[in-house]
Image (cartoon, helix red, strand yellow):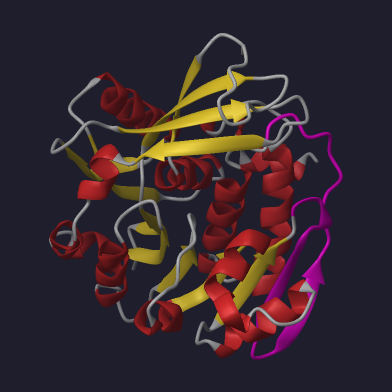
């Protein structure tokens, strides 16, 4: 019935990465490694991660008519993503400036570029993609009004997965469509705002669930994840690995979860698989280059 297991609507950036001994303070200059350029952006990352796992994947995004845009299109196609929904032009390709410290933690500044020009009318013009997709995934590196339009264009039987990153308060229409809403600790607290009572992720998950999503997943890094729905709240254990670079791990988790939900797995089953995919991702450098295949996940 569906042509695609997953349609990702979101950002496509060129990641400009520099390794540093420590991040600079205000007014400070530090020396770093040679510059590395990788295809990235939360939308493009999710699409590649899902395709690597064997999902039939399409991407709806916008890139510039420039070298970075061509890099992004090439990386999508080589991973097996259908790029029929990728629009070209209107602004330069989005850029992410990333510093990575020796522990693998990263700090990121994003210039949205063409991502900021992915408009609601681009979504409504892609109706055939939505009706052909079992699951639709989005993030917030594109305009919020575009995400609202995504929700309005969902096919009746398709499932909507949202990772609200970078986080901001969400309209009720978007919250009510999420199944699940996937947040880390920082994102949960931003969306909860003044409602952020309680100290633990179980508390955050229950309060988030009361705001309207059909289900919620809270990712806890090395501590695994937590899933919440009308059936209750449960923990998903982590997979212990040596972290090299955490870039893209959240995107890989979200893509894997969305794919497995579309395949009929329960939220807890899909999150457990996604945790394994995320763990495999942090053991390699870069975002898209570090995403595992299904065989690599099975071999863990």
Residue 293: name its quadrant. top right
Q: Quadrant of the C terminus?
A: top right
Left or right side of 257 for 6 = left
Up-down relation of residue 143 to residue 294 (above or below):
below
Residue 170: name its quadrant. bottom left
Residue at 36%, 46% in the rendered image: 11
Residue at 68%, 85% in the rendered image: 206
Left or right side of 116 for 232 = right
Up-down relation of residue 207 to residue 193 (above or below):
below
Q: Quadrant of the N terminus?
A: bottom left
Identify the magenta region. Answer: 221-245
Task: Please provide percent x and percent y for residue 209.
Answer: 59, 84
Up-down relation of residue 35 to residue 202 (above or below):
above
Residue at 43%, 40% in the rendered image: 41
- Residue closest to the eye, 152 or 262: 152
The reply to whether the magenta stretch includes residue 40 is no
Residue at 59%, 60% in the rendered image: 257
What count of labels does the image hold? 0
Task: Please provide percent x and percent y for residue 125.
Answer: 12, 60
């Amino acid at each position: 019935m569906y042509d695609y297991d997953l349609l990702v609507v979101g950002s496509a950036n060129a990641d400009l990465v520099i390794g540093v001994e420590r991040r600079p303070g205000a007014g400070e200059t530090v020396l770093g490694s040679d510059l590395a350029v990788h295809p990235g952006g939360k939308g493009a990352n999710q699409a590649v991660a899902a395709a690597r796992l064997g999902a039939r994947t399409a991407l709806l995004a916008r890139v510039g008519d420039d070298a970075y845009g061509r890099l992004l299109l090439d990386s999508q196609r080589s991973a097996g993503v259908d790029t029929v929904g990728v629009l070209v032009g209107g602004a330069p390709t989005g850029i992410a400036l990333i510093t990575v410290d020796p522990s693998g933690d990263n700090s990121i500044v994003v210039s949205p570029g063409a991502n900021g020009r992915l408009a609601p009318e681009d979504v409504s013009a892609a109706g055939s993609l939505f009706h052909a997709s079992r699951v639709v995934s989005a993030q917030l590196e594109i305009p919020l009004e575009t995400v609202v339009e995504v929700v309005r264009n969902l096919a009746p039987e398709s499932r909507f997965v949202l990772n609200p990153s970078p986080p901001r308060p969400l309209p009720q229409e978007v919250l009510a469509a999420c199944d699940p809403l996937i947040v880390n600790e920082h994102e949960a607290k931003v969306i909860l705002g003044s409602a952020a009572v309680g100290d633990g992720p179980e508390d955050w998950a229950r309060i988030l669930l009361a705001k309207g999503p059909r289900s919620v997943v809270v990712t806890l890094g090395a501590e695994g994840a937590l899933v919440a729905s009308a059936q209750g709240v449960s923990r998903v254990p982590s997979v212990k690995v040596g972290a090299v670079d955490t870039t893209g791990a959240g995107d890989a988790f979200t893509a894997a979860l969305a794919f497995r939900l579309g395949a009929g797995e329960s939220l807890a089953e899909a999150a457990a698989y996604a945790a394994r995919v995320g763990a495999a991702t942090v053991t390699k450098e870069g975002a898209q280059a570090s995403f595992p295949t299904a065989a690599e996940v099975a071999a863990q």
